[in-house]
Image (cartoon, rainbow, N blue to C red):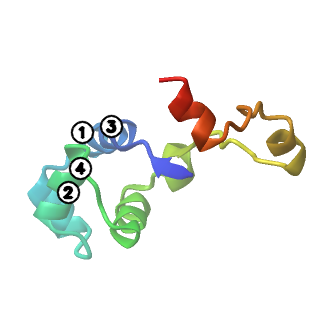
Amino acid sequence: MAEIERKQFAAALVARLRELGYSYGKAVEMWPALNRAMLSRACNGMELSAANYLLVCEMAGLDPYCFLMREKQVRHTLKSILNQPVTAGVSREAREAGR
């Protein structure tokens, strides 16, 4: 499953705003599709919708794929399932007799 590395994205966005000399107000003025609340959430590493994330990246000139974190998933195959150890079955009577 993929996730956005929000803290890394936030740091890059803050650095980009500093580089441009933009406050939130100036950024909204220059990029009218954004608003202060969205910029604040993005700069503080909070979750954004996918559309807003892409919009902020586009406006700031950031590559959205740079912040995509792909976790290695466990792949289950028939062979891996068949090779799993199985506990020997014990009848209910045998379990109760062992008490």
Question: Which of disc 2 and disc 1 is earlier in sequence?
Answer: 1
57 and 47: which is toward the camera: 47
- Say which residue label 1 marks: 18
Q: Quick check: 81 left or right of 2?
A: right
What is the three-letter code of the residue carrying label 2? Leu
Mark 2–mark 4 distance (CA, rounded to whole Å): 10 Å
Mark 3–mark 2 distance (CA, rounded to whole Å): 14 Å
Mark 3 secondary-structure assignment:
helix
What is the three-letter code of the residue carrying label 4? Met
Q: Residues within 10 Å of mark 3 (few under 14, many from 20)?
A: some
Which of the 4 image quadrants contains residue 84? top right
99 and 5: which is toward the camera: 99
Q: Position of residue 50 (x, y in %)?
A: 40, 67
Question: Which of disc 1 and disc 4 is earlier in sequence?
Answer: 1
- Say which residue label 3 marks: 7
Mark 4–mark 1 distance (CA, rounded to whole Å): 19 Å
Q: Position of residue 87 (x, y in %)?
A: 70, 32
| Foreground tag (1 vs 3) | 3
- In the orientation shown, which residue stands out farthest toward the top? 98
| Foreground tag (4 vs 1) | 4
